[in-house]
Amino acid sequence: MSRAKPSSLVVRAESAADRAVRLAREKAATPAKPLPKTPPAALKGHKTAARAWRYLMARYGEIEGVIVTGFDQQLVVNYCLGLEQYAEIQTMRAAAYRLWLELSEAQNAAGPEDKISLAIKTVYSFDMILKLDARLDRKADLLHKFSQSIYLTPRSRAGVAPNSKHDEPEPDALEQLLDNLT
């Protein structure tokens, strides 16, 4: 069974009593202190993660409903740190790839006595690239799961935004006459 969405994201018709019960339950389980706009101490020294925190708080501040609360702070911190780690792994992979290219070129230009040692180094650097690719894939999957939890993916937000209200046209004279008859 799926978890209940925050009341600000519910678009189905609810009775006033049901809505009041939902709001009372949410209020009872919502911390009084909201998430800070500035990055928490856990992100000190993490430039990329702090930038991600500020971006998320700005996006969450643009909407009426409260999607994340103080209870979710560690989840958002972990998400921000995960983004930073993902960027670090990408940097390591790029360095390993450059090394592999250099070793491949050196192997092609080397004499017979150096080819074996260069071939071993080339295979080792290629193995590092594959391992870093696997780490990137696992980190991307984890970040995707985090982003679903904090309503950052299109699918997690699908159907939760209220529809815009359209102005009803003024009733014409015939409609007014029919309304009066009823």
Image (cartoon, rainbow, N blue to C red):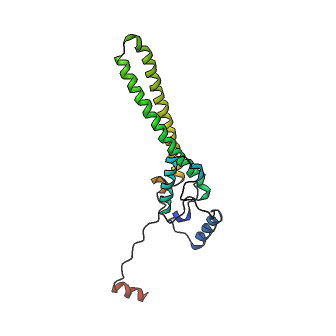
The quarter holding residue 93 reads: top left
Q: 111 or 93: nearer the eye?
A: 111
Measured as percent of width and height from the top left, residue 18 is found at 60, 69
Residue located 45% across and 37% down the image: 91
Residue located 40% across and 30% down the image: 98
Which residue is most to the front? Answer: 45
The quarter holding residue 19 reads: bottom right
The quarter holding residue 117 reads: top left
Residue located 58% across and 51% down the image: 75
Q: 87 or 4: nearer the eye?
A: 87
Q: Quadrant of the N terminus?
A: bottom right
Measured as percent of width and height from the top left, residue 110 is found at 36, 15
Q: Quadrant of the C terminus?
A: bottom left
Residue located 45% across and 38% down the image: 90
The answer to whether 167 is drawn above or below residue 134 in the figure is: below
Q: 67 or 112: nearer the eye?
A: 112
Measured as percent of width and height from the top left, residue 112 is found at 38, 11
